Image (tube, rainbow, N blue to C red):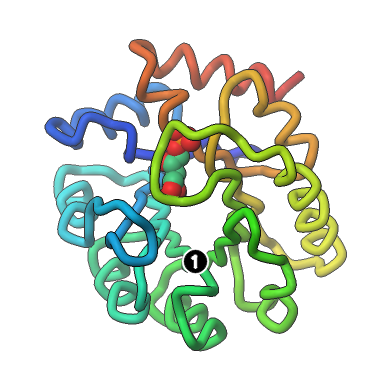
Amino acid sequence: MADYLIAPSILSANFARLGAEVDAVLEAGADVVHFDVMDNHFVPNLTIGPMVCKALRDHGVTAPIDVHLMVQPVERMIDSFAEAGASIISIHPEATMHVDRSLQQIRDAGCKAGLVFNPATPLHHLDYVLDKVDVILLMSVNPGFGGQKFIPATLDKLRQARQRIDESGYDIRLEIDGGVKTDNIAEIAQAGADMFVAGSAIFNEPDYAKVIAAMRRELAS
Ligand code: DX5
Ligand code: ZN
């Protein structure tokens, strides 16, 4: 596994040709496919479900698929996405009555488990479940839409999450989602992130490889 993972969010891809878009972005050097699931309930937008995840696997996508569940309730969707080929499934603590059980359900289904923090959601939700998470995902925008501006307070939160991970000794990825661009990715990495979701920054440009290479140059600097 690369030290830094770049995970394009297909929310900003052209859905009319999704398979080709995912092929193109992986060919362009992406590590992971970030798959945003919205239900018009937990967030005010509606996107794609397990059938689309399975369609990507059937299309031949072998890269990890990182499913970000912005749905409530989450329980039913966990097994559906695991069966559809998800690699990582991340849930928001506000979306389940039973965070511990849902994280365990994800692992029992054979996937890596992620816990997602909205910009105003405190990190104390990690207190009793750090041993059950493989990914901590910090939202640096309010979830629901691509193309929003990075909320600067997230940098401090990243530093706190990084400290918790390092002190715990667990093998946990620290993922950031929202407003990640070539010109702020270095600062975000410095604050402790090691997995970067980027939607509009990649898919709104004509040359995906050029953006991903520029991001990697920034990460190496
Ligand atoms: C927002 C989603 C993000 C979004 C990021 O709710 O979780 O993954 O697609 O888009 P950008 O990179 O454009 O902020
Ligand atoms: Zn996301």
Compared to 50, does 197 lie above or below? above
Compared to 38, does 214 lie above or below? above
Type of the residue with mark 1: Lys
Residue at 20 percent of width and 43 percent of height = 60
- Specify the quadrant of the image occupied by residue 116: bottom right
**Quadrant where ligand 1 appears:** top left
Q: How many marks?
A: 1
- Specify the quadrant of the image occupied by residue 180: top right
Element type where label 1 sits in the image: strand
Residue at 71 percent of width and 38 percent of height = 152
Q: Pick the quarter of the image with the C terminus.
A: top right
Is residue 31 visible in the rendered image? The answer is: no
- Specify the quadrant of the image occupied by residue 132: bottom right
Coordinates of residue 97 in the picture (x, y in percent) = 48, 86
Instruction: Check mark 1 vs ligand 2: CB closer than 8 Å? yes or no.
Output: no
Coordinates of residue 24 in the picture (x, y in percent) = 29, 25
Compared to 137, does 59 lie above or below? above
Residue at 61 percent of width and 22 percent of height = 216
Is residue 187 visible in the rendered image? The answer is: yes
Which sits in the foreground, 126 or 95?
A: 95
Coordinates of residue 81 in the picture (x, y in percent) = 29, 66
- Residue beneath disc 1: 112
Left or right position of 197 against 174: left
Residue at 34 percent of width and 60 percent of height = 86
Left or right position of 187 against 179: right
